[in-house]
Image: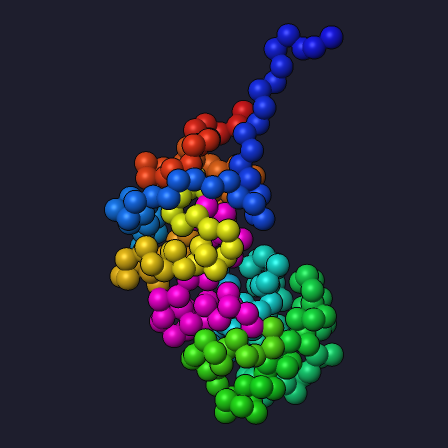
């Protein structure tokens, strides 16, 4: 017998691979959205632990498909053992592996970190290069990693689109797109230049802690007034 009061269907908030898409915000609304996040967190920073450009690069390579917290548990000991590209190259994949075993895909990451460290020593005089082309030529470094390094270490107005920013850009209408590159290009075009550098951090933190994958916490979202998402969650679940 069917229930007299069937439980209402939970709204489908989409997934990382196929986020729900909202109507594109007009430019003034997009700016107001970002400024609301900026006001709430005027000095945003990456949550990855690092102390120089090389350790930032390694931390970002290790963070692919892993949480920043998991990476941060491993990297202090790794960086103490191998603080420079030369020392990391000398440690080699076999030496790096034991430090990062608790991170997903650790075996391929150990090989990449050893190989990119070798490349830095042999092709870049032991320094991390500051161009996208040279960064993306390093083993294990893709567009997203290059964007993070260019932004955080070299002060460039890049936008690294991870799973959180991809979902958020689509869900709220800030930068709907079918691929991370489409979302990235739209964000770079739409966010005012003076906000672009920090926008990466605002969006990533907002996606990680408020506009979450399974259910956005719209009731405590500082940018709610400017968001185009239709199924806003306006009260905490009871
Ligand atoms: S109102 Fe909700 S859906 Fe829109 S950005 Fe905020 S948390 Fe995300």
Left or right of 86 on screen, residue 180: left
Q: Residue at x 69, y 82 (%)?
A: 92
Residue 212 lies in the magenta stretch = no
* Residue bounds of the magenta highlight: 141-170
* Residue 93 in the image, given as x and y percentages of width and height: 70, 79
Q: Residue at x 43, y 40 (%)?
A: 22
Q: Nearer the viewer, residue 16 or 103?
A: 16
| Quarter of the image where the N terminus is located | top right
Left or right of 10 on screen, residue 104: right
Q: Nearer the viewer, residue 163 or 181?
A: 181
* Residue 69 in the image, given as x and y percentages of width and height: 57, 58
* Residue 143 in the image, given as x and y percentages of width and height: 51, 68
Decide if residue 158 is in sight here.
yes
Q: Residue at x 45, y 75 (%)?
A: 132
Rendering colour mode? rainbow
The chief SS type of the magenta part is: helix
Is residue 152 placed above or below 216 in the rendered structure? below
Q: Quadrant of residue 230?
A: top left
* Residue 72 in the image, given as x and y percentages of width and height: 57, 63
Left or right of 185 on screen, residue 10: right
| Quarter of the image where the C terminus is located | top right
Q: Nearer the viewer, residue 158 or 45?
A: 158
Residue 147 lies in the magenta stretch = yes
Is residue 169 placed above or below 12 in the rendered structure? below
Decide if residue 207 is in sight here.
no
Q: Quadrant of residue 111?
A: bottom right
């Amino acid at each position: 017998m069917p229930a007299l009061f069937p439980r209402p269907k939970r709204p489908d908030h989409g997934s990382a691979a196929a986020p729900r898409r909202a109507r594109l915000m007009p430019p003034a609304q997009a700016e107001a959205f970002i400024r609301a996040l900026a006001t709430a967190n005027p000095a945003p920073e990456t949550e990855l632990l690092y102390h120089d450009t090389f350790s930032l690069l390694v931390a970002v390579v290790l963070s692919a498909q892993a949480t920043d917290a998991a990476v941060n548990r491993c990297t202090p000991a790794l960086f103490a053992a191998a603080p420079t590209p030369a020392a990391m190259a000398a440690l080699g994949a076999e030496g790096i592996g034991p430090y990062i075993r608790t991170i997903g895909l650790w075996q391929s990451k150990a090989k990449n970190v050893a190989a990119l460290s070798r490349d830095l020593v042999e092709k870049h005089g032991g320094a991390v290069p500051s161009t996208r082309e040279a960064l993306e030529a390093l083993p294990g470094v893709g567009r997203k990693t290059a964007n993070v390094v260019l932004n955080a270490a070299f002060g460039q107005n890049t936008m690294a689109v991870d799973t959180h920013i991809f979902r958020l850009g689509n869900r709220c209408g800030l930068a709907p797109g079918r691929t991370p590159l489409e979302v990235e290009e739209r964000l770079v075009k739409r966010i005012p230049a003076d906000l672009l550098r920090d926008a990466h951090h605002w969006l990533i933190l907002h996606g990680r802690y408020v506009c979450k994958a399974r259910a956005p916490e719209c009731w405590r979202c500082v940018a709610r007034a400017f968001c185009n998402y239709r199924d806003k969650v306006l009260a905490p679940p009871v």
